[in-house]
Amino acid sequence: MSDSVRRHDGENDRRVVDGTDVRDPGDEVVTDNGAAARPPESDGLPVLGDVHSIAADALGFYERRAAERGGVARYDVFGTESYLLTDPDAIRRVLVEDHASYVKGEMPREQLGNLLGNGLFLAEGETWREQRTAMRSAFFRERVDGYGDAMIDHARGMVDDWRDGDAVDVHEAATEYAFSVLAEGLLGDDIEGERETVRAAAESITERFDMRRLTSFLPEWVPTPMNRRYRRRLDALRETLRDLVAERRAAGPPADPGSADDLLGTLVAAAELGAIDDDELLDNAVTFLFAGHETSALGLTYTLHALATRPDFQERVRREVGAFDDDPTPVEVRDCPALTAAVDEALRLRPPVHSFFREPTEPVMLGGYRLPAGVVVTLSPWVVHHDDRWWEDPETYRPERWLRTSPSGAVSVGDDTPGPAVGERPEYAYFPFGGGPRHCIGMRFARQELRLATATLLRRVRLKAVDEELTLRASANTRPAGPVRVRVREPDGRLESADG
């Protein structure tokens, strides 16, 4: 293929070299002989491909590759042909319009199969539809509202351990909080006594998928010390969950998934009815245990830290939630625009999930390029959320960008189906929870949890950042490289005068 391609947009016919021009998604890029073009090949090393660059700084690599190559950019990992997709309209096509032409693919299954099995995250086709149907009642609005008391109570417990002037690692605190909420609200109190088993498994998962380690790109069956530790701790976790399921069955499962008190009860009831089998029950318990508490913990960490760097907006949120007689309920926080904007902007600036992966089952056209079946397509919220074509001053935490003011002066913001902030930009310029039929089933739960926890905390304390800048790393999620420290002050005005 010639390195030189032509762009046809109905008016212009100009040459594009090495794919560096930014194209409209509908434009077709063709070679000089008129055939649909493939994106320029990766410039990585033989065999290794771009592994070294990704290991050095995965998030930075994605940003550079998108800037250099445009909205569809090739990269290779140990011979696996991969394409970074950062064109919002093309992302919408993959997740929504043409979702039936894509599967999660071999790469996520090879990396995550032993962890998540054939649970909802990795299941395909009719198996996925049956599982989603069996579990969706646990995430109806009225059920999610019912988890609100646990979310508020555990937030109160978290702040009760803080003292005026403490420097608190909010990532550590948020992780404990999110686990406690999940234990009570979704898996019941049964798991509470198994914290160490879960914590050990979580540590191994973080280590296994830390993209700074070249060994994280190796298959799980390679007997490295890290992989052996990972498998051993996962086996212990699954054995613990089997015991919990057996106890639920012995106590008598709910008559149907909709009448269960928590997600584990929902899963057991679905298995008793034959909607899922026992392996899928266990796979989904693991899926929700880690997807449910890790991403929520990161979202809360980044929200609290971001507000700690913006005392003016933090005060605005405090006044908003302080107007209630008590800690706001799930219904009340849906009418808190400043609080909602604070959370949504934190998820834009530091999305807990930096990448989603898909694999086309047939040749597809994306961003004007033709991609073959079976390649890895990487959809990156991280890159899109930091693209200055869609976001003014994208590296800055600016929750005001989400607020709409009506002619009467009323302020509002989106709620359960968050789209882009105020302004003209594509719908999928913002997608922290994915999109389309396979969007995160726990999105409503997570957004409620983040808002209730933030509201409960800010009614009791002021926060000032100790670590103004954060260093992040790409593991299975977007994680801080070290502690995320904020200074806690009682809400009596001392925050502004504190020397921090």
Image: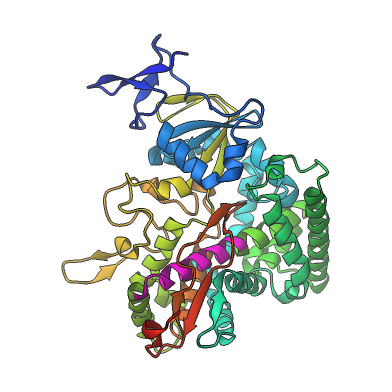
Q: Position of residue 239 (x, y in %)?
A: 83, 61
Name the magenta segment's main secondary structure. helix
**Which is nearer the eye, 84 or 182?**
84
**Which is nearer the eye, 425 or 149?**
425
- Decide: is 184 above or below 470: below
How does the figure colour the protein chain or chains?
rainbow
Quarter placement of the C terminus: bottom left
Lateral position of residue 298 relative to residue 17, left or right: right
Q: How many marks?
A: 0
Residues drawn in magenta: 294-311
The residue sitting at 40% across, 88% down in the picture is 494
Residue 416 lies in quadrant: bottom left
Q: Is residue 336 something that shows in the picture?
A: no
Q: Position of residue 312 (x, y in %)?
A: 32, 75
Q: Position of residue 410 (x, y in %)?
A: 23, 71
Lateral position of residue 200 relative to residue 146, left or right: right
Q: Position of residue 223 (x, y in %)?
A: 83, 43
- Decide: is 8 above or below 389: above
Q: Residue furthest front?
A: 499
Residue 274 part of the magenta segment: no
Residue 296 part of the magenta segment: yes
Lateral position of residue 325 relative to residue 269, left or right: left
The residue sitting at 50% across, 36% down in the picture is 84
The residue sitting at 50% across, 61% down in the picture is 470
